[in-house]
């Protein structure tokens, strides 16, 4: 039943998706729908493959040697692992935010502008507009509009992470992948970030990997529970957390390690 | 010593007493002495040259032309020669060296070819400068018919600067966190875009340091330059003209006993220039890498 409600308006769909590190089968045939305009949390213990799965959605695993995949991840009707897919296009449409805020040691302006520049935007006025729109999108504009030329490393970690999200949305993606985005942040900054996620949810398909169960419960519409490279359970977050179908899910969310 | 402190009783008298002569203190004195001596050598050299040369260093000396082989007059042509030679060699060596470093760090796996390239650059570093001079003379000056000129000299100096630039740039590039590159790739950047827009700007302070270090070496180089750039006292009009750089001028003045006084003046100018470049580099670096805090509400 949960699966049915998720397939409506799926933005990204994994179909029997498998991933090997050399001979090791890390993802064992995953079938998951990521619905549009909602937040899907992937939870599970360390080493369960949740980050690997997330990084498969914009093919970041391509950078690792010895990685092979089978099955499909379908985005906008095409399998993103099809040889005809333009990697640059995919990654500009499927943005990613990392565990630690990766603000480049450049100015705040250049940190955001580097993404559209990579896409070939050169006109100053156009860049200005993208930078302002992106920073407004994450609620950072009013804080930094007078300091755009200053180094981004002077920002607090929470604001650096917002800046990274601003950079990720500057290329006009419709999917944003967040890999434990709050793990380097203090509790207040974490809540601010979650607020931002709720706001972004109106326009984007968000997928967040987290090992913080409260965060998954608080800040997601759907939850995917993974264990040992397999998906154990998927469904609306409320249902997964209050009435899990699988006993392993229940053991995990109640803190009894599986 | 603190034999009368309250803790004594608990451990029995004298239990905590230090040996009379602590080996730690001896070691401390030894390394401190080394440090003081090192600084003293530097201060002495700079002080000696500056004091000896200060009397000669007048505006007329800096901006005048040499007369009577340098016994009288100034050193303006040599200043111009040194600056143009150094700049020309940086313009040649920096792109080449940085390009090599980018190739080694970003575009190749550790393999036979990269080992050959690295071994080659390291070997270059070990070659005495006089050999560079000889090579430059035979190849650039004679074989390619460039004559004694800024061009020949700067090509030779560029070859000497390469190892320093390659090595320091490589180090700076390797110190760029992998996660920066990952982030750039995640934004849809190609490898070249990643290098150009993220890796190089991040590594820039380190690269600039390396280039300036190499420049410092080039400014003071004598043996390689005297063979390739010549020792003309005239003001150069183009890169095809010969020049006499400050160290060469100094060498000739002192070696031929023309004017020890002017030799010290030249040395003082050279030393001031090098120190100025070093301070400027330090200042620029400091400004680039300084994390400027942003005013927040």
Image (spheres, grey):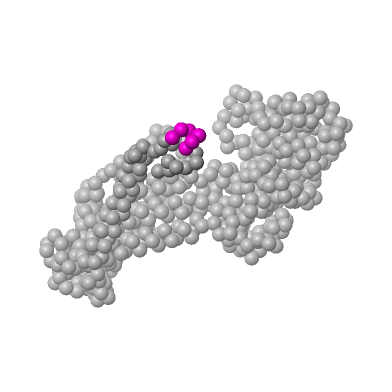
Residue B255 falls in image quadrant? bottom left
Residue found 80% across the figure and 42% down from its top: A218
Q: Position of residue B148 (x, y in %)?
A: 22, 59
> How many numbered discs, if any?
0
Q: In this orientation, does residue A54 appear? A: yes
Which residue in the rendered view is the most extreme toward the bottom? B60
Residue found 19% across the figure and 72% down from its top: B66
Magenta-span inclusion, residue B2:
no
Residue B73 lies, with reference to residue B81, above or below; the image says: below
Q: Which residues are magenta?
A: B8-13
Q: Position of residue A185 (x, y in %)?
A: 67, 46
Q: Position of residue A228 (x, y in %)?
A: 70, 26
Which residue in the rendered view is the most extreme toward the left? B257
Residue B103 falls in image quadrant? top left
Residue found 79% across the figure and 36% down from its top: A223
Q: Nearer the viewer, residue B97 or A46?
A: A46
Q: Quadrant of the C terminus of chain A?
A: top right
Q: Nearer the viewer, residue B98 or B204?
A: B204
Q: In this orientation, does residue A42 appear? A: no
Q: Position of residue A212 (x, y in %)?
A: 73, 38
Q: Along the horizontal axis of the image, is B109 left or right of B42?
A: right
Q: Quadrant of the N terminus of chain A?
A: top right
Q: Along the horizontal axis of the image, is A257 left or right of A106?
A: right
Residue found 62% across the figure and 36% down from its top: A61
Magenta-span inclusion, residue B9:
yes
Judged by its main secondary structure, the magenta piece is helix
């Amino acid at each position: 039943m949960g699966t049915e409600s998720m397939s409506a308006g799926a933005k990204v769909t994994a179909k029997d998706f498998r991933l090997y590190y050399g001979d090791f089968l890390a993802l064992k045939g995953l079938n998951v729908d990521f619905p549009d305009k909602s937040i899907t949390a992937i939870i599970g213990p360390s080493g369960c493959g949740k980050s690997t799965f997330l990084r498969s959605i914009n093919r970041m695993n391509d950078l690792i040697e010895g990685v092979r995949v089978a099955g499909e991840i379908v985005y906008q009707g095409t399998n993103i692992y099809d040889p005809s897919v333009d990697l640059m296009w995919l990654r500009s449409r499927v943005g990613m935010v990392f565990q630690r805020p990766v603000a480049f040691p450049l100015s705040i302006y250049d940190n955001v502008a580097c993404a559209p520049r990579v896409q070939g935007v050169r006109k100053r006025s156009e860049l200005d507009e993208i930078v302002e729109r992106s920073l407004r999108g994450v609620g950072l504009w009013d804080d930094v509009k007078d300091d755009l030329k200053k180094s981004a490393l002077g920002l607090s970690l929470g604001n650096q992470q917002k800046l990274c999200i601003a950079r990720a949305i500057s290329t006009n993606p419709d999917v944003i992948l967040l890999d434990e985005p709050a793990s380097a942040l203090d509790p207040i900054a974490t809540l601010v970030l979650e607020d931002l996620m709720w706001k972004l949810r109106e326009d984007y398909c968000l997928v967040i990997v987290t090992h913080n169960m409260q965060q998954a419960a608080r800040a997601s519409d759907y939850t995917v529970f993974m264990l040992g490279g397999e998906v154990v359970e998927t469904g609306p977050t409320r249902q997964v957390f209050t009435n899990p179908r699988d006993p392993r899910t229940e053991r995990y969310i109640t803190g009894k390690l599986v | 010593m603190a034999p009368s402190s309250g803790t004594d009783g608990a451990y029995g008298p004298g239990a905590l007493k230090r040996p009379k002569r602590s080996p730690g203190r001896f070691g401390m004195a030894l390394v401190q002495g080394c440090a003081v001596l090192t600084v003293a050598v530097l201060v002495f050299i700079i002080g000696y040259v500056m004091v000896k040369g200060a009397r000669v260093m007048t505006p007329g000396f800096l901006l005048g032309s040499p007369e009577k082989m340098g016994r009288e007059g100034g050193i303006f042509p040599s200043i111009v020669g040194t600056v143009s030679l150094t700049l020309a060699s940086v313009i040649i060596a920096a792109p080449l060296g940085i390009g090599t470093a980018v190739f080694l760090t970003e575009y190749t796996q550790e393999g036979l070819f990269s080992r050959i390239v690295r071994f080659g650059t390291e070997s270059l570093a070990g070659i005495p400068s006089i050999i560079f001079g000889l090579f430059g003379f035979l190849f650039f000056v004679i074989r390619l018919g460039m004559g004694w000129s800024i061009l020949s000299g700067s090509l030779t100096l560029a070859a000497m600067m390469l190892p320093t630039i390659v090595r320091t740039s490589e180090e700076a590039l390797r110190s760029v966190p992998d996660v920066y590159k990952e982030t750039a790739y995640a934004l849809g950047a190609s490898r070249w875009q990643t290098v150009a827009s993220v890796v190089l700007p991040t590594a820039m302070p380190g690269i600039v340091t390396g280039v300036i270090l190499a420049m410092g070496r080039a400014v003071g180089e004598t043996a390689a330059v005297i063979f390739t750039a010549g020792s003309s006292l005239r003001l150069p009009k183009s890169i095809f003209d010969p020049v006499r750089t400050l160290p060469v001028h100094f060498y000739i003045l002192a070696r031929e006993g023309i004017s020890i006084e002017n030799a010290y003046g030249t040395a003082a100018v050279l030393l001031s220039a090098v120190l100025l470049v070093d301070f400027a580099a330090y200042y620029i670096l400091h400004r680039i890498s300084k994390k400027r805090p942003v005013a927040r509400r």
